[in-house]
Image (cartoon, rainbow, N blue to C red):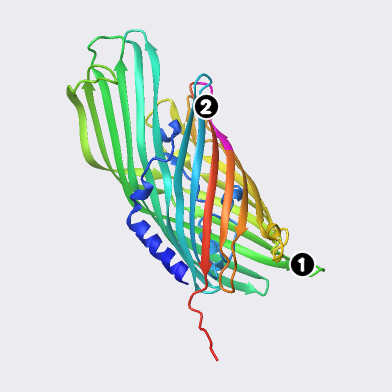
Amino acid sequence: MQKISSCFIVVLLVLLNVDAYSQATTNSPYSRFGFGDILSESFNQNFALGGTGIGLRTNSNINAINPASYSEITITSFEIAATNNALWLTDGTQNQYRNNPHINYLAFGFPVISNKWGMAFGAMPYSNVGYNYSTIQADSIAGDVSYYYQGEGGLTKIFFGNALKFKMDSTSNISAGYNLGFLFGRINNNKEVVYGSIPYAFNFWELNNKHIADFTSDFGAQYQKTFTNAKAQKYILTIGATYALGTDLKTKTSHVITTFTGNIDFPSLPIDTIFDEEDVSDITKIPAKIGGGLSLEKNKKWTVAVDFKTTNWGQIQSNENNVSYKNNYTISSGFEIIPKYDAFNNYFKRIKYKFGARYSTAYLSINNTDINEYGITFGLGLPIKRTDTSMPGLHLGIEYGNRGVESNGLVRETFVNFNIGLTINDRWFIKRKYD
């Protein structure tokens, strides 16, 4: 009880100091587009299962992918996770390596009415922007023209969710839930154009800054059926669905274009301001997303899960001629096995071994080339000493994957994400009896 109470205070302090999430935690040139790299909402339970979660339910873990799962929570839980992103970039001739550690999320879940009503809230980074690169193009009149791109920032999401469970009969139930989210943050994009072959040329410097803050909503439902075979072995089937509303986020935009002479290393002071708008009211569109998933579990033995999600990115308009957005889909799958749940004399048999994979078609097309992505995951769920009222765990996961191509003027990214998470839980409001 004291541990959970302390963690609850930590969550509140972090939510009040959310600038901890504002650091740049990516070095991807693809984060220049839209509102950056969109991060997975995978929690400790989901990461090593390929990011699946639409059809997953447990009583001691928080699953924000489908808010309907909160109704299964029967024990007060605090979760925290961090990820280290090791990133290798290549365009076929040059190679770079970057390392980006960051906090994944903080979340707190608890039953309001056990097996009927559950709640959860927390904070997580929603998108990251971080890039710094340049290109050179030959112009028949101006000669070599250098383009320098630099950006940083991202969006943070605070969420609060509820879910209710309704019993249909002795072997089946249905749950419905929602997450109310609040997205906020800043995104700074800078672009400089330098005419290197023309002495004393007027070069261009463009700054585009956005401050975003608004509410979002997503909903989920799950149907669960329990089966028992002739050997009295229990199997649980869960079918889930999710829907996130498309939203026009309130945005304040500042856009400045100035000229200067010199080069990128030794520029002059701004010579003239061509365009200047400060704190203009605008909107940033987030597309609608729909998903479906299912899982089959042999009670306390193994679980297999599959998810499918599609996002309506095609409604987003690009302001660059060589860039377009398109509807995409993601398919993911995961498998978890526990050799022997109650083997208290053999720790390794009580470990949860997890495997997964995911594949996403492109929502971003650059130079008529789709930017697809895939990942392969593996992880361990390490039990920590249990008591009558708690079942804490340490979660380790690793993901290897690729995004993009090293042709047509683009970059191929190879990444290894290492995730470490902690779940601490306990039962609250227990009436003790003493003789």
Q: Position of residue 81 (x, y in %)?
A: 49, 53
At 35% from the left and 34% from the top, the residue drawn is 151
Location of residue 382 with respect to 167 vertically, above or below? above
Q: Is residue 51 visible?
A: no
Kindly identify the amino acid type of the residue bearing the numbered disc 1.
Gln
* Residue highlighted by disc 2: 369
* Residue highlighted by disc 1: 233
Location of residue 293 with respect to 411 vertically, above or below? below
Assess disc 2: are there few (<14), some (14-19) or many (≥20) residues with their C-alpha within 10 Å of its C-alpha: some
176 or 423: which is nearer to us?
423
At 56% from the left and 57% from the top, the residue drawn is 394
Q: Along the horizontal axis of the image, is 172 left or right of 158? A: right
Label pair 1/2, CB-CB below 8 angstroms: no
- Element assignment for label 1: loop
Tell me how far mark 1 sits from mark 2, CA to CA.
Answer: 50 Å
Q: Residue furthest bottom?
A: 435
Looking at the rendering, in which quadrant would you find the C terminus? bottom right
Q: Position of residue 185 (x, y in %)?
A: 34, 46
Location of residue 219 with respect to 432 vertically, above or below? above
Q: Which residues are magenta?
A: 401-408
